[in-house]
Image (tube, rainbow, N blue to C red):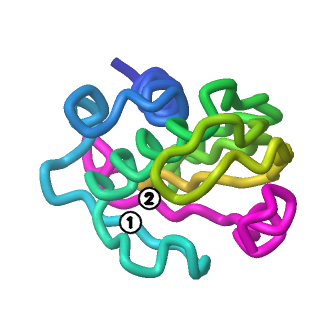
């Protein structure tokens, strides 16, 4: 399987809320995660992030991504995916009544590979803007 194929399958599984149980097949067991976003400040593993994404879709069951770009950098062993996440807060997931507000959030994943598996992923995302759109901040 190529880096592109692995990254595409991981990206789709992560973004559709499959969680670590599914996503781990494309990742090293100890894969790390980073983001300069307060909403993800406590998340340092890719396992934690994929499960966070799974939980994010609970209050927004219509959550989905719109892929804008997908690029492989063979020289550096990474794959970048740029997308827009869309969703509307319609379900009380234990954090309060649904706001009925929607989000349209641009973000980028940079997936660093070691061999055929992801060893680290960085998410580039303006969480403050997204939380305001949803009425969560």
Residue at image location 54% in from the left, 37% down from the top: 57
Q: What stretch is highlighted in magenta?
A: 113-137
Q: Which residue is nearer to you in this view: 31 or 99?
A: 99
> Which quadrant of the figure contains the C terminus?
bottom right
Q: Mark 2 points at which residue?
A: 121
Residue at image location 66% in from the left, 42% down from the top: 81
Picture layout, residue 58 above or below residue 9: below
Of mark 2 and mark 1, the one earlier in the sequence is: 1
Q: Name the residue under label 1.
A: 33
Asked if residue 30 lies left or right of residue 84, the reply is: left
- Mark 2 in CB contact with mark 1 (< 8 angstroms): yes
Identify the secondary structure beneath mark 2: strand
- Residue 47: x and y in percent read 26, 52
Residue at image location 44% in from the left, 58% down from the top: 121
Residue at image location 37% in from the left, 78% down from the top: 42
- Residue 84: x and y in percent read 79, 41
Asked if residue 93 lies left or right of residue 99, the reply is: left
- Residue 108: x and y in percent read 68, 53
């Amino acid at each position: 399987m190529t880096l592109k194929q692995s990254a595409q399958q991981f990206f789709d599984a992560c973004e559709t809320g499959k969680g670590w149980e599914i996503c781990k097949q494309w990742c090293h067991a100890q894969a790390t995660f980073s983001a300069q976003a307060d909403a993800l400040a406590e998340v340092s593993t890719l396992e934690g992030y994929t499960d966070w994404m799974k939980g994010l879709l609970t209050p927004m069951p219509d959550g989905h991504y719109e892929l804008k770009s997908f690029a492989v950098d063979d020289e550096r062993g990474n794959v970048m995916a740029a997308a827009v996440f869309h969703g509307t807060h319609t379900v009380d997931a234990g954090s309060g009544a649904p706001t009925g507000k929607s989000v349209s959030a641009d973000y980028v994943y940079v997936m660093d590979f070691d061999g055929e598996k992801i060893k680290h992923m960085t998410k580039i995302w303006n969480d403050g803007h997204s939380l305001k759109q949803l009425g969560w901040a």
